């Protein structure tokens, strides 16, 4: 059996391991020994390595036919040294991976003033986080062009699921959101659907190709918070003009309220032949309410 190497064994990657291990040998990179048991239970072998310590990556060379790169960049700087270190390790032997799938972010597009866009729109990152993701994508594209490895990039928006990754804590605190006239469009993908897109991209992703890994929702941020509030039985958040929010929310939270875009996801449906389990946030929350009741 061919081997898949998972780098960045977080929640989304763990969701796809049971599916992968029926088709491949799966090896997941972990930083600490205590992380191994959870991955063994899912059917993966483990390898201890740390992308922030290039000297620990020597064992990654030549062991994988396919790589799922799900590790984020560091929290500082304008580059992604983790991706550079990973690619350097993978090229230390002649046996290179045939395919590499990377989870990036739709933040690479920057603020688009609410416009609809597809993957042909050039990246114009406005935040330091997105700048680092663009750097990672560039390293990966050059790696694919240089080695022949088939690199595909899944650009993910806000990731959620029916129980976690929802803004419940903010709703419980009564934190405000933007007034309708100042509100921004947001984009979403259920964690289970993003995991399935990883698997589909392994088989169907085109080389040096980006994919908007987004669902069919077209929601402004306030509408999203209202949907979640109704689903969990909490009051809808107050709405305030942008000028009044500046002193009440963290800079990180405010940064997510400064970009507005709507994503076309035709490419994942046409090329990856994806059928989303949760086409919209409302669909996922409806399933959640049924499960609770």
Image: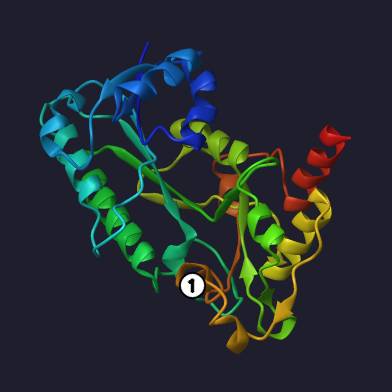
Question: Which residue shows up at 44% across the image and 35% down it?
Answer: 10
Q: Please name the residue that numbered disc 1 is placed on.
A: 255
Circle count? 1
Asked if residue 27 can be seen in this view, the reply is: no
- Report x, y in % for residue 29: 31, 27
The answer to which of 64 and 129 lies nearer the viewer is: 129
Residue at the farthest right position: 293
- Report x, y in % for residue 164: 63, 42
The answer to which of 73 and 155 lies nearer the viewer is: 73
Quadrant where the N terminus sits is top left
* Left or right: 5, with 278 as reference point: left
The answer to which of 268 and 218 lies nearer the viewer is: 218
Question: Which residue shows up at 61% across the image and 49% down it?
Answer: 189
Residue at the farthest front position: 173
Task: Indicate whether 152 appears above or below 123.
Answer: above
Residue 96's image quarter? top left
Question: Which residue shows up at 24% across the image and 63% down it?
Answer: 77
Residue 276's image quarter? top right
- Report x, y in % for residue 39: 43, 20
Mark 1 lies on a secondary structure that is helix
Task: Indicate whether 32 appears above or below 134.
Answer: above
């Amino acid at each position: 059996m061919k081997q898949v190497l998972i780098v960045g064994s977080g929640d989304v990657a763990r969701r796809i391991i049971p599916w992968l291990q029926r088709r491949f040998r799966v090896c997941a990179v972990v930083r600490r020994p205590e992380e191994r048991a959870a991955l063994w239970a899912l059917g993966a072998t483990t390898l201890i390595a740390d992308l922030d310590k290039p000297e620990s990556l020597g064992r990654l060379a030549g062991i994988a036919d396919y790589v799922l790169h799900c590790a984020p960049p560091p929290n500082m700087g304008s580059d992604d040294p983790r991706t550079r270190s990973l690619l350097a390790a993978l090229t230390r032997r002649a046996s290179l991976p045939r395919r590499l799938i990377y989870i990036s972010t739709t933040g690479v597009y920057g603020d688009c003033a609410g416009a609809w866009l597809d993957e042909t729109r050039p990246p114009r990152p406005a935040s330091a986080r997105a700048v680092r993701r663009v750097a990672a994508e560039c390293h990966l594209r050059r790696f694919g062009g240089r080695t022949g490895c088939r690199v595909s990039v899944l650009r993910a928006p806000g990731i959620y699921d029916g129980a976690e990754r929802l803004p419940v804590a903010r709703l419980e605190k009564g934190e405000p959101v933007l007034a309708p006239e100042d509100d921004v469009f947001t984009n979403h993908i259920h964690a289970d659907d993003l995991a399935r897109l990883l698997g589909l991209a392994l088989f169907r992703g085109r080389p040096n190709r980006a994919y908007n890994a987004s669902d069919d929702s077209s929601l402004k941020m306030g509408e999203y918070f209202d949907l979640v509030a109704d689903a969990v039985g909490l009051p809808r958040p107050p709405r305030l003009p942008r000028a009044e929010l500046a002193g009440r929310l963290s800079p990180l939270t405010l940064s997510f309220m400064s970009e507005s875009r709507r994503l076309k996801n035709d490419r994942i449906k046409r090329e990856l032949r994806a059928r989303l389990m949760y086409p919209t946030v409302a669909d996922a929350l409806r399933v959640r309410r049924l499960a609770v009741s």
